[in-house]
Amino acid sequence: MIATDGEPSTRAAVAAGPPPRAHRFVGPVTAGLLVLLGVLSYLAFAPPSARDAGAPREEFSAARALVHLREIAQRPHATGSADNARVREYLVATARELGARVRVESAPVVRPDWGNPFPAATVHNVVAEIPGTGPGTSGGKAVLLVAHYDSVPTGPGAADNGAAVAAMLETMRALSAGGGVPNDVVFLFTDGEEIGALGAQSFVNRNDLGEYGVVLNWEARGSHGPVMMFETSAGNAALIDAFAATGSRPVANSMAYEVYKRMPNGTDFTVFRDAGATGLNAAFLEGFHEYHSVRDSVDSLSRDSVQHHGETMLGMVRALGVTDLRSLASADAVYFDLFARALVHYPAGWALPLALLTLLGLAALIAVGAHRSRLRYTRLLAVAGTGLAVVVVSAALVLGLWLAVVTIRPGLAALPLSEPYDRGLFGSGFCLVAAAVLLGAGRLLRRLRPAEIISGTLALGGVLLLIVVLTVPGASYLFQWPLLAGLPALWMAVRRDVWWQPALSALAPAVAVVLFVPLVVSLFTALGIPLGAVAVAVAALAGVLLLPLVRRPGRSAVTAAVLALALVGAGVVASGFTAGQPRPNALLYVQDPASGGSRWFSPGPGPDEWTRRVLGDGPSRADGALYFPEQDEQDGWAAPAPDLKLPEPEVRTVADRTDGDVRTLTFGVRSVRDAWRLQVRLPREPVRACTVAGVRMDAATLAEDIEDTRDIVLHYTGAGGEIEISCEIRAGTPLPVDVTDFSPGLPGAAEALVGPRPDTTVPIAFGFAPDDAAVVRRITTL
């Protein structure tokens, strides 16, 4: 007798009847093991414990690195500042004490490829070389380690990027203590990364990259967490081999590689990669609210993350230091870590054959099941459609829930990227939303046969595998291995019913848990809670594989939904601003006679208790795009301010000649008050070309991203004197030169008017919105 409507035949039920006691335990034990796997995957996503100063001399010690870090991160040390020079002198002296050959490369530089506003500065890179013991190993090619030593002007930069700089110094010491490696190792401490990767660009301009076989860049976007290798150059298989052999915890996956190379983000490594270098990029990412802020201090930094930085660095240097660097060119690899303890990697060329073989096996089993009347195609499609609906509905509900949160708590808009402090409550609640949807879907499918549910979930995974392997092969592992692990359960389900079917059905979700948990955690970290719907959609993709195990969920869907709302509600309640979770804000003094005199300006959703002292209760809305074209958040609030008569920037003509219909005008710009940044704004017409820092930019280059800035805009940081710009314009045409200078922090007279910040507020992090500054503008027509 053939079972119909999902009910197994009596004969099949008797044949598959379980031992009396085993039946009642198989489900809970299977569920418990899956939960345990998830917990272990989550807990394993962590850096190694920091080593103290007593660690062997040839090994890395975070405690020894922190001695350097305390010197580096005393205060903000942005490009062009006195503290930037202090840090540079420390690096030079320390590297020489460690036996390195050291030079400082100083040069003006501009990034034409950056677009408007064009960043420029005079940068000072520190280059320290440890000669190899067998330089012929790679035909003279060296290993190049890179970390930027400049900080943002708003914070001491302990994590970004002091941790990597200090780790490089400790790596230099440990490398020498261990006897060195055959290849030369060069430590490059770049300047100007925070203002446009200018130090990296200067190094590429001045040096032959052919002398370096590999470039290893080290970064941070937070204050703690494991160091994740998130980017490589193309043809990375040999690099992945070396990364797997570091001896530290290898946290990396080729999904991140595929995603990052399609994003507009950039670091120093971007400059090297675009110049054709082979290499990789690594950073720790957790602790977003310390990033670029006054709280990026040594006290906030995880010693364990510093240890992971250093262990990975030293391991890579020792692995690549004995390698013929001329042999690194290779194909791409698919790779992922298991519990941050082992790195699985294989050629990307294997991905398509593996996928096709797996899909062939899946198709064969589905055909057998249909032939034996163990499944119906219509029900298989219904399950696959339900699984897809789980993903879409989960993401939509989370997006709607977040929109409700920001409606209830509009003050969250004051936080960088609206990222809440209590992100764990929101992240957990959002994942429970997906769990509730999944359990509800399981209830809808409870009358279907096991073979139909298993085949439907695997069919959905198979379609996704085929799409991914053809478009982003580096991400194929996410579907390849759970799908392959699910085939034994389908094989048994199309043959007969057995009491231990749940154990087989748990294989695919078990593999998915191991692969997806660290990925989902990384997505929540990298994208933030406001984009949590993306992370939840990815989590739901893995959760669909649980459908064969949740055929009788009872009221668990309701329970999960209630818990989800409780956690999100707790997050909403906890989202007020306190001394421990302060509200970011900024206040700027703007002196601009051309736009009506002096005024206060504050970005953000509205005045707070501090800014209201000078903005009053009725400030007007204001557009800051004229002064801050580089900022995503430009709107704010303004109110009249007293005239403090700050010195205006100066503009003078250096040379002026006309040849035919072209007037070549060279002019100098200087901040009388020695401000940190000069902004020069020029009209698109009649400018035909401009030369800055020795680089001529034609009209097409000058028009890059001009729709965002309206004019040609140049940012010159840390000038410390006059800068010269030469422009070619139509003969007989005057040129209005609009110059604004910016200095971090309010001038003393302005500080006296507003008073001290309350402890429930904190200066806004650099780069997300205009930060505290004195801004002075002047227009001169030449």
Image: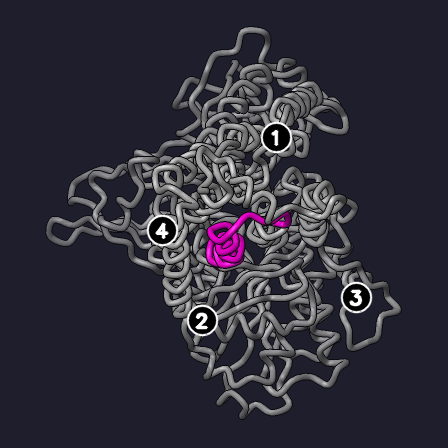
Q: Is residue 337 magenta?
A: no
Residue found at the very far top of the displayed protein: 618
> In the image, residue 413 lies at what x, y percent?
55, 24
Query: In the image, which residues are magenta?
Result: 478-500
Q: At which x and y percent is residue 572? A: 65, 20
Amino acid carrying label 2: it is Pro
State yes or no: residue 479 in magenta: yes
Mark 3 touches mark 2? (CB < 8 Å) = no
Corner quadrant of residue 778: top left
Q: Residue at x 48, y 12 (%)?
A: 620
Q: For residue 553, which numbered disc appears in the image?
A: 1
| Relative depth, front residue between 592 and 210 | 210
Q: Which residue is mark 3?
A: 61
Q: Is residue 220 visible?
A: no
Q: Position of residue 134 (x, y in %)?
A: 60, 92
Q: Residue 371, which numbered label? A: 4
Label 3 crowding class (10 Å Cα cut-off): few <14, some 14-19, many 20+?
many
Element under label 1? loop
Up/down of 405 relative to 422, above or below: above
